Amino acid sequence: MSMNKATRGNFIFGLVLIVAFGAMLWYRGRDVGPHTPLAAFAEGLTLQQATARSGESGRPVLVFATASWCGPCQSFKASTLSRDDVAEAILANFEPVYLDTDRNGTEAQSLRISGIPTVIIMRDGEQVDRVSGALPTRDFLEFLRPHMD
């Protein structure tokens, strides 16, 4: 028994949906979510802790605002923030804060975060610079450079 055109079209459409759904589940299951160990943020400092340490160390606070559902955030983490050279630059020059905007909505609002990913540089509790979007590594390091000692 052969399939007619409509049945074959429905079959192909269903197959494409299944493959797309499987790809989505695979992507979301990859190890690039909020549990991913990013070396620069491994200490798990809160904004309050980082601000206090900044006062002692003289290094600015670097806030990385993100959310688990944000595709560009996951891409930024996987392509830029997971690099050893980026982690070294952050750890040597900043007090890093990983800010999950879903879990820390009040802090996100106080920092006026309206889009993610966003990286904010703070000195003495005041924002001195910010960038939104997933930057390529070179551009991200250029953004950090004026704030590094």
Image (cartoon, rainbow, N blue to C red):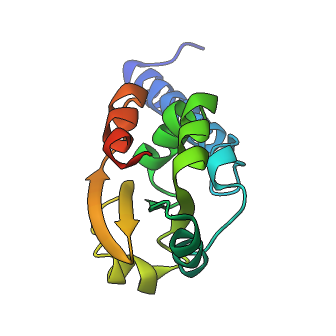
Residue at image position (54%, 13%) is 2
Q: Which of 1 and 9 is in front in this view?
A: 9
Q: Where is residue 124 in the image (x, y as percent from the top left)?
A: 39, 75
Where residue 95 sits: x, y (%)? 55, 61
**x, y (%) of residue 57?**
57, 65
Residue 131 drawn at (x, y percent): 28, 51
Q: Vertically, is 36 above or below 51?
A: above
* Residue occupying the point 64% across, 55% down: 41
Q: Can residue 38 be seen in this view?
A: no
- Quadrant for the N terminus in the image: top right
Extreme residue toward the bottom, this view: 106
Q: Quadrant of residue 130?
A: bottom left
Residue positioned 60% across, 40% down in the render: 87
Left or right: 41 with respect to 129?
A: right
Residue at 52 percent across and 67 percent down: it is 99
Above or below for 100 versus 4: below
Looking at the image, is 117 positioned above or below residue 29? below
